[in-house]
Image (cartoon, rainbow, N blue to C red):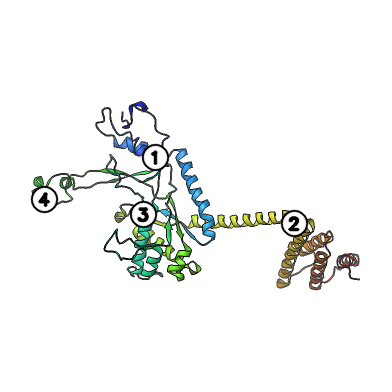
Amino acid sequence: MAIAAVPAYLGVGTDFSQASPGLRFGMLLPLWEQGFTGKDKKAAFDSARRLNPSDQALLAALRQRQAALAAPLAAQGRLLVLDAVAVAPFTTGLGHAHPLENGFAFLNPYGLPYLPGSGVKGVLRQAARELADHQWGDAQGWTTTAIDALFGLPDPAADPDEPSVFQRGALLFWDVLPQIAGDRLQVEVMTPHQSHYYQNDAKSLNGANPHESGQPNPINFLTVPPGSGFVFHVQCNLPLLARTDPDLADNNQWQTLMQAALRHAFAWLGFGAKTAVGYGAMADDAKARQLREQQAVLQREAAATQARTERTAAMDPAEREAEAAASRLAEFRLVLADEQTRKQYKPGSAFDGMRADFLNYALTLSMAESRHAAALALRESYKFTDWPGKKERKAQVKAALTHLDGQA
């Protein structure tokens, strides 16, 4: 039975199924036989790649936390949010040390797959450079000046070949937490054929070069499956950008440039590792974007309703009546204007019923100003439709209007 290389006090064969994927793939990988000889890679991968319900709930909670932090920043124009969906497997962190030769990047302390913000920045800087150099035709607004303002100039001590002026970029890139399709990560296989070249010394090779006819060596590695959702957050330091490049800060021009860079990266560069062979390719997620826009509208409406409720609660009764009357009057005038525009009034129509309801409501008002305003609107409506045909009803309406505005 394969076991994990853990201290003896934990016990041989301890069930680690409820540990995070990062722990199950790393410290708690059931890879070794008794005596720690031999490997059972398939069983080890199967145990590590599954996301149990608590993993999925934690991942959803982290994404919700990001959304809650992003909402006020986006409303202020300081954050660009773009939804994407993976159209190919995504992997990152293959260079991390691991017994299976290929590691995987998990976010500490949660042990969940993620794409580091630093990786997002590197890919988008390259996308911006390609666009600015017209390698793909239209630069879509990108220039070297815009790249320096948004991404910054590197520290010359880190790379002597770069410019000697250090400048911080205006953008901050959040880590990306994928919404994994299904309940488990996916296992991919790479099969290099040059093991005879890389695993032997120069003397035994006798000057031979690597070639594709060598013995294949299948190597498994973890990936996030296609169809998984990614939400990219790009935050902007607007005061800094206003100093380094005011044009980009004006009317959120920086967001237009970043949208172009993101979509170029989705289609042609990819994110994570092994992008040269197609991994990490993504596409704009139109459905997620529409859902996000609908949620934003609902949130704004809820906030406006809450604000109105709080404002109304702070009013005295006369103020509340005046505001409610103004709202009903505005609604009535809007319907009246629509009827006048269409010129399709018919006696006994829905408009007559609404007008009767508004008249009855106006008669309940106590504020003289509100009563008079309602009477004026009602008199205007009868100029459009004429008075009721029945003598008794006409007299009742005129008497009600006289009562409202005090006119004989």
> Closest to the observer: 242 or 119?
242
Q: What residue lies at 43% left-to-right and 34% top-to-bottom? A: 18
Find residue 47 and report its horizontal and vertical position in percent.
36, 36
Q: Which amino acid, by three-letter code, is at mark 4? A: Ala
In this figure, what is the number of numbered marks?
4
| The N terminus: image quadrant | top left
Q: CA distance from mark 1 to mark 4?
A: 42 Å
Label pair 1/2, CB-CB below 8 angstroms: no
Label pair 1/4, CB-CB below 8 angstroms: no
| The C terminus: image quadrant | bottom right
Q: Which amino acid, by three-letter code, is at mark 1? A: Pro
Closest to the camera, between mark 4 and mark 3, is: 3
Label pair 3/1, CB-CB below 8 angstroms: no
Closer to the chain start, of discs 3 and 1, is 1
Picture quadrant where residue 7 is located: top left
Q: Which amino acid, by three-letter code, is at mark 2? A: Met
Closer to the chain start, of discs 1 and 2, is 1
Residue placed under numbered mark 3 in the picture: 119
Residue placed under numbered mark 4 in the picture: 208
Closer to the chain start, of discs 1 and 4, is 1
